[in-house]
Amino acid sequence: MKRIASLLVLFVLTATLSAQKTANPVIVVETDKGVIEIELNPKMTPKGVAQILGLVQKNFYRGLRVHRVTPNLVQFGDPLTRNMNNRNSWGTGGSGTRVGVAEITPAMKHVRGAVGLAYSGEAKYADSQIYIMKNLMTGLDGDYSIIGRVISGITVADRLQVTDVIKNITLKAAPVK
């Protein structure tokens, strides 16, 4: 009986450690209107997720503004938005480092809460701009890389307006178990 209990404990510990190793990263987007948590999906989009996590670690997003809002999405991640006098150029800037590949699969759907990478020209040119879907928009399916999904704060995304500030984006610490 002790052997079975020991094996059960070992199994539970192994499963827990395995789950912790494979947990998807979560980024926390702090805005003027509240907080949005986004679970990234590195299995589907490893290069895109690595790109965004690298920018988050560099505090790239701190102080940027929302530059595009439509009934279906909200978009941010352009460093040109730091200059309020240059609004005509908002949406054209980036970090200067492109993802370099188009990570698009049929499983990626533009549903409410989906988070994708914006680009100009071709999907492989995605850089630092992120959009959050506020509504279903199947017309984008197959053309843009979905890097994750909102797991908390979708109503915050609904309230964001052009010029709202992204105070910062950070990587959420893994829970201590």
Image (cartoon, grey):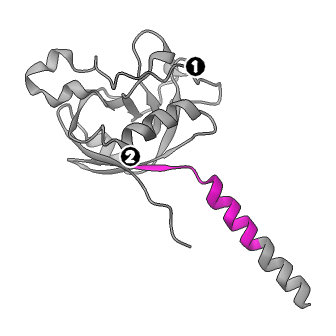
State the image coordinates of residue 34 (x, y, percent, origin top left).
26, 52
State the image coordinates of residue 105 (x, y, percent, origin top left).
64, 25
Amino acid bearing label 1: Gly
Residue 44 part of the magenta segment: no
Q: Is residue 149 left or right of residue 10?
A: left
State the image coordinates of residue 37 (x, y, percent, origin top left).
41, 50
When asked about the image quadrant of residue 128, the answer is top left
CA distance for labels 1 and 2: 23 Å
Residue in view at x 58 percent, y 19 percent: 142
Amino acid bearing label 2: Ile
Counting residues from the start of the chain, the first of labels 1 and 2 encountered is 1
Residue in view at x 51 percent, y 19 percent: 100
Secondary structure state at the residue bearing disc 2? helix
- Residue holding disc 2: 154
- Residue holding disc 1: 142
Q: Which residues are magenta?
A: 12-27
